[in-house]
Amino acid sequence: MKKELSSKAIQRLTLYHFILRDYMLKGIEHISSQQIAALLKIDDSQVRKDVTFCKTQGKTKVGYNVLELRKAIEDLLGFERRKDVFIVGAGNLGFALAKYDDFKDYGLDVLALFDIDEKKVDRSINGKKIFHISKFEDLVKQMGVEIAVLTVPANVAQEVADILAKAKIKYVWNFTTTVLDVPDDIKVHNENIMGNFLDFTNK
Amino acid sequence: MKKELSSKAIQRLTLYHFILRDYMLKGIEHISSQQIAALLKIDDSQVRKDVTFCKTQGKTKVGYNVLELRKAIEDLLGFERRKDVFIVGAGNLGFALAKYDDFKDYGLDVLALFDIDEKKVDRSINGKKIFHISKFEDLVKQMGVEIAVLTVPANVAQEVADILAKAKIKYVWNFTTTVLDVPDDIKVHNENIMGNFLDFTNK
């Protein structure tokens, strides 16, 4: 990915991709920067600026070709690069993420889930097996997985993060409300939905 | 909330609050800006700057009082202002959010869930009843709810958003991968976790 692409631009381009999927499903061939901008309530010059990062061009009065722009965003954001993940915590949120088939369109492949609850172990959800957490380190090594999605309860999150660190996982996508204490070579993204909510409703 | 507080500052202050909760649970009385910064791998001057928005002060060589700083963040971010929400879509994600008791600590109160599936209607999850979506508009009016959390499948999201708009909901917290077309007076926050993931794993 190009270095100039900011986090906000990646966020916006992902939303454009959602819009393009819906246009595609409706069989609409072209979309203008104004149409995208109106849905997101942003300025259309912003859309045009973001699209300059993509290998596609719009046509005056016609707009962008929906399939071309969609493919160009996928190339830019690397959807074709497969990213294998393990979900750690087979609760409702872990299940919701495991059942989310759209993930595959974005290159994210959930290979398995892990939990400490013996009643859940060996069950499957959406074709993905649930393993006991004691198997985590071995399976990370065998399958070369670098990304863990953490969906355990907050009060055990640090303990589980220690297991992830020991298994030399590289990325932790943290959905818990615990700030994890992990070695510097592990990248953590805090999916801080509570912060988003407070930001959103207080404005 | 003060206007100067940026989205990023709100995000960080929420994470500080998570850290303070853990310190409190461990019975630790003081925390330094360096300790907070080390956990989040950010600069400690950033922490001190953010804390200036709070009505509390640290002491040299001792740091911040954990309980005081926690309370000051809660006051600043308005945790005591109760925000009633309806969850629309009683699937795994809706259930995960309905079962998430920590929400209440942040002022977010899930009053009920809605779904179209008659098999789910009248059941309860974590003490919250599931209603048929046809009851949504009436209950919004009766209970004065302004915030809807949208957790339905992407392919029906727009159709459901139209129901939310008709009920004059003010805020939609959108967890679907559909960009919603709603009137300008409705504020939508796209909880774009796919964009976050792409941003996180591509860097």
Image (spheres, coloured by chain):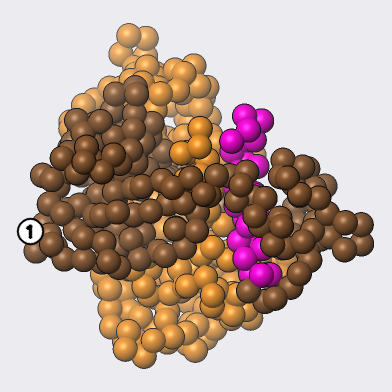
Chain colours: A orange, B brown
Residue B124 drawn at (x, y percent): 21, 66
State which quadrant residue A92 falls in. bottom left
Q: Residue at x 15, y 40 (%)?
A: B138
Residue B80 drawn at (x, y percent): 51, 49
Q: Residue at x 28, y 83 (%)?
A: A123
Rendered view: B160 above or below A61: below
Q: Secondary structure at mark 1?
A: loop
How would you classify the magenta stretch by its main secondary structure?
Answer: helix
| Residue B2 lies in the magenta-colored region | yes
Q: Amino acid at mark 1?
A: Glu
Looking at the rendered image, the quarter that the N terminus of chain A falls into is top right
Camera-nearest residue between A76 and A187: A187
Rendered view: B158 above or below B73: above
- Which residues fall within the magenta stretch? B1-24
Q: In this view of the protein, can residue A120 be seen by the observer?
A: yes
Rendered view: B135 above or below A15: below
| Residue A82 lies in the magenta-colored region | no
Q: Is residue B195 left or right of residue A179?
A: left
